[in-house]
């Protein structure tokens, strides 16, 4: 039995399915990002968030309930939040938690796991997602920005000169955007929002396409029967499911239906699949690079993988 068989027709179907699934949410995130850029003053965040840094991070972890977003869109929105002056730790916390701590994901998870302890799975997924995102936020709070943010983001922080090249932005586009905002008219602000959203969409769409292509090769060319023997061992099953979720790069709003289909795998392995994948997968590895330095992206992935594996394996005592 061959473990790798590539068929272009199968690849094309899988690739387009993933792309059409992710693009609407990416578009939604880009539109929201453009609206924030054009209509939300930077000082609004200082009024919304508590003055206490730890309370602000904790509140940011719950913002997904108000601004539900999948992982593709959350990166775009978090990047815009950072450029508008939101503290980095709060933006990172929102970026990691929004794809999990939101009502759409909660409902899809509950529906997918009917007959498989849906309340427990949904509650644990949201709780672990919130806990881990807030923990990462606290860690980022202690880190110097120059060490973790890439140069492109550093140059666009409030008070710094915007010198970085942006995909999709024509020469002088930044000045045109600022001029449009200075006019203050509704029409000019709408046009500025469209321009900003378009630029963000083009920035991120490239990495979504790359991730979808890699995922589709794995989905269609690799024989899935080779991972089935891992189901009988909880630690191996958990690690295998997390690795699989990294490669599949599914959307957090629908990945629960995939996880629930692995009926022979332990409950904790499916939980790890759902929590890790919404926070870090192959497309997010590229997308996070739009904000962070590559070493930090790698460290984030390793840290989340380790923490989620340990936490989920500790839950085996519940005999779920």
Image (cartoon, rainbow, N blue to C red):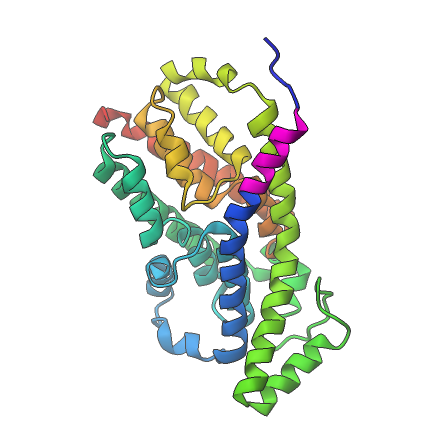
| Quadrant in which the N terminus is drawn | top right
Residue 198: image location, x then y, percent:
62, 66
Please tell me whether the stretch drawn in magenta is mainly helix, strand or loop: helix
Residue 27: image location, x then y, percent:
54, 59
Name the image quarter holding residue 164: bottom right
| Quadrant in which the C terminus is drawn | top left
Name the image quarter holding residue 228: top left
Looking at the picture, does residue 83 appear above or below residue 105? below
Residue drawn where x is 32% and y is 64% of the image = 55
Q: Which residue range is magenta in the image?
A: 7-17
Looking at the picture, does residue 246 appear above or below residue 46? above
Residue 7: image location, x then y, percent:
66, 25
Extreme residue in the right direction: 171
Q: Decide which of 40, 86 is in the foreground and name it.
A: 40
What number of labels is visible? 0
**Whether residue 142 is visible:** no
């Amino acid at each position: 039995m061959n473990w790798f068989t590539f068929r272009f027709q199968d690849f094309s179907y899988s690739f387009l399915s993933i792309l059409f699934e992710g693009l609407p949410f990416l578009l939604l995130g880009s539109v929201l990002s453009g609206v924030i850029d054009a209509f939300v003053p930077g000082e609004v965040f200082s009024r919304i968030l508590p003055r206490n840094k730890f309370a602000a991070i904790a509140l940011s972890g719950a913002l997904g309930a108000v601004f539900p977003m999948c992982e593709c869109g959350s990166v775009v929105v978090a990047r815009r939040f950072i450029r508008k002056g939101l503290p980095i730790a709060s933006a990172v916390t929102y970026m990691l938690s929004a794809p999990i701590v939101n009502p759409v994901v909660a409902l899809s998870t509950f529906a997918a796991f009917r007959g498989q302890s849906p309340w427990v799975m949904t509650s644990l997924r949201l709780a672990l997602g919130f806990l881990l995102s807030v923990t990462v936020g606290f860690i980022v709070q202690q880190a110097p920005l120059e060490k973790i943010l890439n140069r492109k983001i550093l140059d666009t922080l409030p008070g710094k000169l915007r010198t970085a090249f942006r995909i999709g932005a024509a020469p002088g586009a930044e000045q045109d955007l600022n001029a449009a905002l200075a006019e203050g008219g509704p029409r000019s602000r709408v046009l500025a929002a469209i321009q900003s959203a378009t630029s963000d969409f083009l920035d991120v769409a490239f990495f979504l396409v790359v991730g979808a292509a890699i995922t589709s090769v794995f989905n269609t060319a690799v024989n899935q029967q080779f991972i089935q023997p891992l189901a009988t061992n909880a630690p191996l099953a958990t690690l295998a499911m997390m690795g699989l979720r990294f490669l599949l790069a599914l959307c957090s709003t629908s990945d629960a239906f995939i996880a629930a289909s692995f009926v022979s795998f332990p409950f904790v392995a499916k939980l790890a699949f759902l929590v890790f994948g919404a926070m870090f997968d192959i497309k997010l590895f590229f997308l996070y690079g739009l904000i962070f330095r590559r070493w930090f992206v790698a460290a984030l992935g390793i840290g989340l993988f380790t923490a989620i594996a340990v936490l989920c394996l500790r839950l085996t005592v519940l005999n779920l």
